[in-house]
Image (cartoon, grey):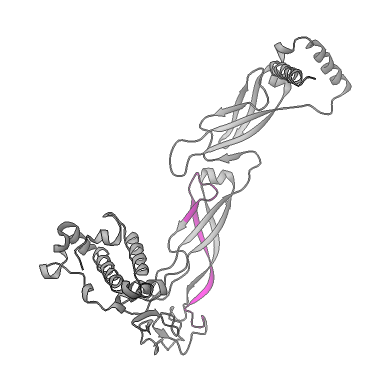
Amino acid sequence: MSKRDYYEVLGVNQNASEAELKKAYRRLAMKYHPDRNTGGQGKDAEQKFKDAKEAYEILSDAQKRAAYDQFGHAGVDPSMGGGGPGGAGGASFSDVFGDVFGDIFGGGRGGGSRVHRGSDLHYNLQLSLEDAVSGTEVKIRVPTQVICNACKGSGAKKGSSPKTCSTCGGHGQVRMQQGFFSVQQTCPTCRGKGTVIDDPCTVCHGGGRVQQHKTLSVKVPPGVDSGDRIRLAGEGEAGDAGASPGDLYVQVAVKEHAIFSREDNHLFCEVPISFVIAALGGELEVPTLDGKVMLRIPHGTQSGKMFRMRGKGVKPVRGGPVGDLLCRVMVETPINLSDAQKALLKEFEQSMEGTGSKHSPHSSSWLDGVKKFFEGMGF
């Protein structure tokens, strides 16, 4: 291989993560696959394929990567006392092919049976706004797959044990020859486990796991909102024998509240007031999630006016200042008036005649605008 920089070969920077290295390696392996580069370009593609292989083997190994970062090629070249790329330069092309495509098709170099981590579970948890804001602890009951006690997860009937798969010889992988290349795939007989069960457990029917319900306690931190997830590590389904269980993800959904609505860390509510209080001013008792507070309404308040009550909102679950409660007052028009009340209102209206701009500036301004509009239209 020409002594190009390994990072340059893979097209990544020196801070690339393991996942980024693997992604770059796969991309190059696909690009320079000989089946896609026939004819005169085949030799060049094969070399680039091997170059990518060597670069990935060095950079994916923490010790070799550290030596390369410090000493360059001299730190990993076996002819110069380094660790070497593990014989990548002399590796067969089929081995190179198997390494990268084994991950894609379920295979992998080196053989060996594979155990699978348990599946993650998801649970939808509905909370009241009060519980979401203040935090709570709830009990949930979830269905899950657990290790079968009868066979201890082996899947074999008591007194028997799984046998080595005759198809793959216990490796869990089979190698299929395709012309110049060989591809590793998951064994179709044992499905990658390396063993088969002739006499399955009568409880789990050979699966090694059984369906059960379990009750869990979920601590909900203060300030959660709809869409937040709470992870309970290891509370998912059981894995294959020797594999770790999955996780349980609790998805939070906050129920609609009769009084308050929430936006980020702020709470909103509408407060109806009479037109008398709106005109003369006064004080109202309004609710908050912490209790009752008094809201002062100044005289001449218009419908839709927003009042902010600082620190009466939600404390963010990830830290930060507490939000506010914003109260929008809505002037309510009285209904079902008696004759005497109607007469009083008419008397009041008569007393307002000729003083529109003084007592109703918005109405007067609007009427002036309408008048100018009609004049401009020629009406």
Outermost residue toward the right?
339
For image coordinates 54% across by 64% down, the residue present is 142
* Foreground residue among 313 and 35: 35
Q: Is residue 97 above or below residue 142?
A: below
Q: Is residue 148 above or below residue 363?
A: below
Q: Tell me the residue at 80%/14% (across/down).
A: 348
- 12 sits to left or right of 124: left
Image location (x, y in percent) of residue 325:
56, 33
Confirm whether the magenta stretch covers residue 187: no
Residue span colored magenta: 204-230
Image vertical order of residue 95 relative to residue 85, above or below: below
**Residue 225 in magenta stretch:** yes
Q: Quadrant of the N terminus?
A: bottom left
**Which residue is pictured at 26% across the width and 68% down the height?**
51
Q: Is residue 72 left or right of residue 292?
A: left
Image position, residue 321 (x, y; %): 45, 35
Q: Is residue 187 left or right of residue 145?
A: left
The x and y percentages for residue 186 are 41, 79
| Residue 218 located left or right of residue 184 | right
